[in-house]
Amino acid sequence: MAQLSNQLMALTVLAYLAAMVCYAGEYAFGKRSHVGRAAARQLVGAGAPVEESAPVVVAPAKLGRSEWSGWIAAVLNVIALVLHLGTLVTRGIAADRMPWGNMYEYILSATFVGSAVWVGVLLRRPALRHLGLFSSLALVVLLGAAALVAYTPVGPLVPALHSYWFIVHVSSVIISSGIFLIGAVPALMFLIKNGYDEGKRSFPYTLGKRVPTPAVVLERLTFRLHAFAFPLFTFGALIAGPLWAEASWGRYWGWDPKEVWAFISWIVYAAYLHARATPSVKRTVATWIALFGFVTMLMNLFGVNLFFEGLHSYANAK
């Protein structure tokens, strides 16, 4: 089973890579959607409704070659998701436990959640398919890093993880991390698209030329994903985590490097949601805070596990 899991992992990366290539074909050569003007209601700040004219994407009547490339990419994305699930299931069977015991398995699980969330967004909002280029790129990079930097042979859990809190704490953090991962994609594209609409023509703002989705739609999707993930992250990192620490080590908080960086991530994401709800703060400023939050999550995943010693060092056990 362990060997099968590794083989499925390779196929998963190849499937995501193939999807990325097809997404890139639609992104680079596809016709831009026709943009009309229609009345749209947008929530401003704390919630005061304001009527304003916003661009609405209208899909082309017929599918061209580039559009077919996009739909093929979506199918490959679903196939990759199924292979990804197979990788996790066979890994769990081989280890006779939930596959969350080390950094390699954590990345596998968080990226699976991110991929599942992206497929859900794709099914609900097909017009956002062009974002698949960037979501699949993120998945390929993270899975490649997991295989090259964090790979760990199948083994039993270390004694510190033998607790019912293991499932409660780790599952909530994994789910929220996967959503934050996908939430960073529309956040980045909002900043690029908004900059292009404001007349910026340097890289990377030139990428906004090929983005048919209005910036306001990208920003709203960013907010919804982060607003959904934040309570889960709060529960996993700041409630379940300290309760488990008290049960295992006799204290709720010990300023362990991983605890510190989880708290930093929580502060940054809380600052984003606060800024998003404050009328005087520009949406671009709030979105930059959200992206910085994702950088702190990456630091907690890679930097802390690889370069710091602490009570959570077993997360990168070889």
Image: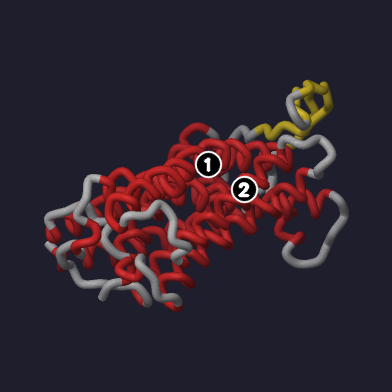
Identified by mark 1, the residue type is Phe
For discs 2 and 1, the disc positioned in front in the rendered view: 1
Left or right: residue 107 versus residue 219 is left
Residue 101 screen position, x and y as percent:
26, 60
Q: Depth check: 206 or 85 in front?
A: 85
In the image, what residue occupies the spot 44% across and 41% down?
235
Q: How is the image coloured?
A: secondary structure
Identified by mark 2, the residue type is Pro
Left or right: residue 31 versus residue 156 is right
Mark count = 2
Q: Can residue 274 be seen in this view?
A: yes
Spatial CA distance of label 2 from label 1 is: 17 Å
Left or right: residue 189 versus residue 173 is right
Mark 2 or mark 1, which has the lower sequence index?
Answer: 2
In the image, what residue occupies the spot 51% across and 61% down?
260
Q: Is residue 156 above or below residue 176?
A: below
Residue 114 screen position, x and y as percent:
44, 49
Q: In the rendered image, which residue does mark 1 sit on?
A: 230
Quadrant holding the N terminus:
bottom left
Q: Furthest-right residue in view?
A: 199
